[in-house]
Image (cartoon, rainbow, N blue to C red):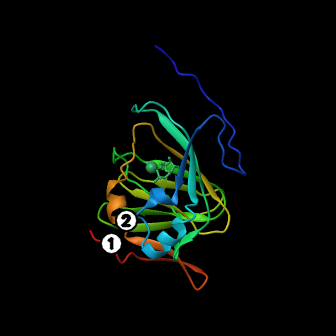
Amino acid sequence: MEYKNPLGVDINLETGVIPGAKKLVRRLSDLKGYFVDEDAYSELLKENPVVYEVYAVEQEEKDGDLNFATTVLYPGKVGKEFFFTKGHYHSKADRAEIYYGIKGKGGMLLQTPEGKAEWIEMRPGTVVYVPPYWAHRTVNTGDEPFIFLAIYPADAGHDYGSIAEKGFSKLVIEENGEVKVVDNPRWKE
Ligand SMILES: O=P(O)(O)OC[C@H]1O[C@](O)(CO)[C@@H](O)[C@@H]1O
Ligand SMILES: [Fe+2]
């Protein structure tokens, strides 16, 4: 039997950086078609800000193993919509996931394939359980980076397709200085 080596790393709780992790950067241009307000999107695209960065420690895609990753989701809005991660189902749809809030303020939108949505607020210390089959997207509703840890099965995979095409049935927006979760006018089942 070949055993893998255990690993201990310290997440920088201020920056979200995991030493030695693989870094992925997603700019606004990577989120084309994701935001409802297309004019606001085109305007902000001139700056093309970084929307989020992921620091991932991933294993081979094998059943039984685990990956973990931090995400640093920057504050910002496209029109009324707060910055968010793309959001995805898992390619192996029955794989669950755990998120843990580290810094900043935000939340998670979750959705079943039929479009039943839930919004869970996240602060430092919040644990979110993502059950099998639910799509998940995190949203920064604050004015500083929202940083969290995700722990997920190594064979879960990412299925971005249906969210890229249809989005979530709910939007998280700012209106009159308040955070609101409202119906997505473009949502179609
Ligand atoms: O993969 P997305 O939807 O862009 O969101 C990024 C975050 O979600 C994960 O894919 C885990 O669900 C992580 O890699 C990262 O924490
Ligand atoms: Fe996931």
C-beta proximity under 8 Å, tags 1 and 2: yes
Give neighbour class at mark 2: few <14, some 14-19, many 20+ (Cα, 10 Å). Answer: many
Callout 1, which amino acid? Trp
Left or right: 33 with respect to 126? Answer: left
* Residue at 39%, 67% in the rendered image: 117
Quarter where residue 104 is shown:
bottom right
Looking at the picture, how far across and down is residue 19, in whole percent?
Answer: 66, 37
Looking at the picture, how far across and down is residue 35, in whole percent?
Answer: 44, 69
Residue tagged 1: 187
Q: Residue furthest bottom?
A: 176
Q: Is residue 136 visible?
A: yes
Marks 1 and 2 sit apart, C-alpha to C-alpha, by 7 Å
Residue tagged 2: 167
Q: Quadrant of the C terminus?
A: bottom left
Which of the two discs, 1 and 2, labels the residue nearer the N terminus? 2
Secondary element at image label 1? loop
50 relative to 150, above or below: below
Left or right: 73 with respect to 33? Answer: right
Callout 2, which amino acid? Gly
Foreground of the two, 151 or 131: 151
* Residue at 35%, 53% in the rendered image: 133
Looking at the picture, how far across and down is residue 108, in whole percent?
Answer: 50, 62
* Residue at 65%, 60% in the rendered image: 145
Secondary element at image label 2? loop
Give neighbour class at mark 1: few <14, some 14-19, many 20+ (Cα, 10 Å). Answer: some
